Each structure stands twice: as structure tokens, then as C-alpha cells.
Amino acid sequence: MKNINIDVKNVLATVSMDNINSFEAKADDALRMLHDGTGAGNDFLGWVNLPSTTDDALVDDIIKTANDMRANCEVVVAIGIGGSYLGAKAVIEALSDSFAAYKQDNGTTVLFAGQNIGEDYLYELTSYLKNKKYGIVVISKSGTTTEPAIAFRMLKEQLEAQIGKTEAAKRIVAITDAKRGALRQLATEEGYKTYVIADNVGGRFSVLTPVGLLPIAVAGFDIRKLVEGARKMEKATAQGVEDNMAMLYAKTRNALYAAGKKIEILVNYNPKLHYFAEWWKQLYGESEGKDHKGIFPAAVDNSTDLHSMGQWIQDGERTIFETVISVINQRHKAVIPTDEANLDGLNYIASRRVDEVNKMAELGTRIAHVDGGVPNIHITVDSLCEECLGELIYFFEKACGISGYILGVNPFNQPGVEAYKKNMFALLAKPGYEKETEAIRSRLS
């Protein structure tokens, strides 16, 4: 039985089921291309059967490495950018105690670096790590991507200064290319424990590889259950059958896009899902934003953002639709107390669970937005557990591949990402970019 379900009835005032099903043939073709590798970007389809082909021995080895790091480190810094950090961050935040950072018995804390070039961020991180027992998981296929390379250089130097080069090598794990690149060379020379980033799995689809699994395991969560959840969803979405929810989501998104709905807002009512939405935004934005096409992915955290973005969503330009994620079961129970004075007027909800109020806020908002002309796709998740998150991750990945092919783009490349890098290298006068440096400086003069 799946822990994830989808309901599209609240889009039918905008697009009919006939509209949605008009994309059936394209969705069937997309699913076939994903599985037989005949579509664009077919050299990056290793994620499609990844859950079912993940070796149990690899998972066991990752868990052993994670346990070794937990035994020897108060803090582990995962260094990466884009898909090399967002998947792990999404799962860890979804599963963690919201106030774990303030508790003394939290075990090993996982922090992230290399996802920005913030000078204050790196200074404050290195200051925090002084006199801390820390380790590093560095994630980079090449080892030369600017943001993580800067962070690794700084944190590696500090770790070696604090405990010596030999001991530091025991606390550094590199997740990188099997044979090539600067990080692979360094890892071999220094004797770091390593895991491989497979050539056929792109960064935004890599959370179920060691890229995501190791930091998640270091944080103390059960990656076996995460992979098992993904396996269930892989099986459930493998065939072009009527109840293939990944196909339904992909078809519905494309029907709404064809009807002029150019922006999709992923909505959650659980603050633990904030970074899951950030992962989703990269997955869909980088996969579909090609050839001047693609739905713009946005996200809100409700009910918080109802007090900031709520007005625009309710009454702004009608170019949007929402995909709402509802978490059915909460991890804990909190009840609203009775107050004799009742100055806040809340006694009418006294003795009720906080989650009941939250769910009524969600239902009331969904009704209001649909009445206001905002189509709603509704996805329900049984709970925020490892298995459910594994299912949800694979569901969105599979739907993304199908949706991109329906749209007519290559969902697995990202040519537009390179433009800023070329300009940055030229502005910094990187060796080999002399002509570009001269050209860009002439533009700025």
C-alpha cells in the first residue's frame, strides 16, 4: 500500500479530465523512453531503476561509515551545492527535531557548506568549528566547482591544523567521480574514504545515491527505509496504468500549463518541509526550464506565508496553480488548553489538537484558492518518516522525467547554468579565460 496519494479534482474547473487525458499518449511515450533509454538525455537515466538496483552491501557500508563519523565527530560538514546538498538537507530537516540544534544530547550535528559564497557564513562556520571534533563529507564530481571547492579548501586546512594531516584524512569522506577529477586525485593521494557519483545520475536526481544517503545516515536516520520507500514507488510507477500517480501529476501539470497556468506553487503546512520544497524547486526548475519553456516552480510555507503571499495567491494574476502537500499523521501530540479568562477568544478550540486547527486552516485555504480561480493538485503523505519520504522523492523524480518529455525538452541537462560561471571566471581573471576577461571588462568600462 502506497503512503502517498494524489487528487486532481480541484483542477477540473480549469482543465477537464479529457484535457488531462489528452496528454496520455505523450505520457506513455515519456514513460517508455525513461525505461528503455531512447529519449533525450538518456545518458542520465541511472536514477530510474536506482532504488531497486541499490546494493544492500553499499547501504551497509554507508551506514558503517556514518556510524564511524558519528562516533568520532560532534559535527560533520557536508560540502556541496545544488543537488549535492539539497536532497540531504531536505530529508534531514523533514526528519529532525525542530530544535535539535539547541539540545545538548543531539549526537552528531550535520551542517552544510559550499552551497554559497557567503564570507560571513564561512567565517562564522570556521569560528564555530574551532576546538570542535568535526569531519567533512565533500561532494563534487570534479572537485573544482567554485562554491564547494572554496569551502573544502578552508575547512580542510582548518581540520588539518587542529588535528594533523594524518588524523584529518580519517575524518574526510569524498563522494566524487570514479576515476577523474581533482577531488578523485586528492582522495587517492590522501587516502580518504570515497564513494562514487555515478556518471549516469545527475546531481538533482542524486539524493538516493551516497550523495544524499551518507549525510542522512550521519544525521542518524534510517536510509534502508528511505531506499525501501523509493523502491515501492519505483514499482508503483513502472507501468502506464490508470493509477500511475506520477503520470497523472505530469499530465495534469502540462494540461494546466497549456491552459495558461505558468507558475506552480508547492504548498506545505508543515515547517519541516521547507527544504523539501527547495529540493523540488531545483528538480523541476533545472529540468524543465529549457528552450524558453517550462512552468516556473515556486513554494510557500503555510500558514506562515498566508500572512505575506496569501493576498497575491488569492487575488493576483491568474497564471498560477498550487500543488499542496498534506501530512496526515504528526509525530507528536499537542493540545490547546482551556483558559478561564478567554481573552484571546480561543476557548472554542480548547481541548483540540493543534494539528486539527492546522488542517482546517489548510482546508479553508484550499477552498478559498479554488474559489478564487487557483487550481489545486492535492498530494497526501501518511507521515514524515523515512519510508514516506523515499516514496515522495521518487514520485517527484519520476513525474519530473515524464513531465519534461511531455513538454518537449531534455529534462536531464542544464545548459543555462554555465552562463554565470563563464562570466564569473572572466571577472576573476581565471587562467584560460583571458579573452573572456578582456571582453567582459570592455562591456563594464
Image (cartoon, rainbow, N blue to C red):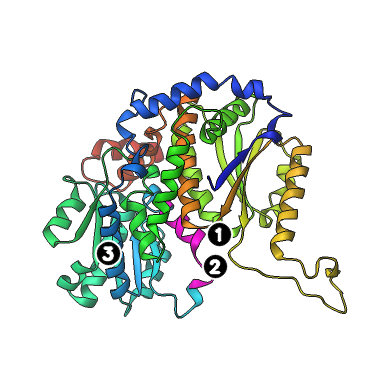
Q: Secondary structure at mark 1?
A: helix
Q: Residue at x 81, y 75 (%)?
A: 338
- Residue 211 appears at what percent x and percent y? 33, 52
Q: CA distance from mark 2 to mark 1?
A: 7 Å
- Quadrant of res 78: bottom left
Mark 2, Cα crowd under 10 Å, few <14 / some 14-19 / many 20+, is: few
Specify the quadrant of the image occupied by residue 44: top left
The amino acid sitting under disc 1 is: Lys
In reply to whether residue 341 is colored magenta, the answer given is: no
Q: Quadrant of the C terminus?
A: top left
Q: Position of residue 290 (x, y in %)?
A: 45, 29
Left or right: residue 411 versus residue 326 is left
In the image, what residue occupies the spot 30% across and 76% down?
A: 133
The answer to whether residue 445 of the structure is visible from this angle is: no
The residue indicated by pointer 1 is: 272
Is 94 within the magenta? yes
Q: Main secondary structure of the magenta part?
A: helix
Residue furthest left in the image? 189
Residue 367's spot in the image, x, y percent?
77, 43
Task: Give the extent of the magenta segment.
Answer: 87-100
x and y, in percent, of residue 120 in the image? 42, 66
Q: Where residue 64 is drawn, which disc sits there?
A: 3
Horizontally, residue 309 falls left or right of residue 398, namely: right
**Earlier residue among tags 3 and 1:** 3
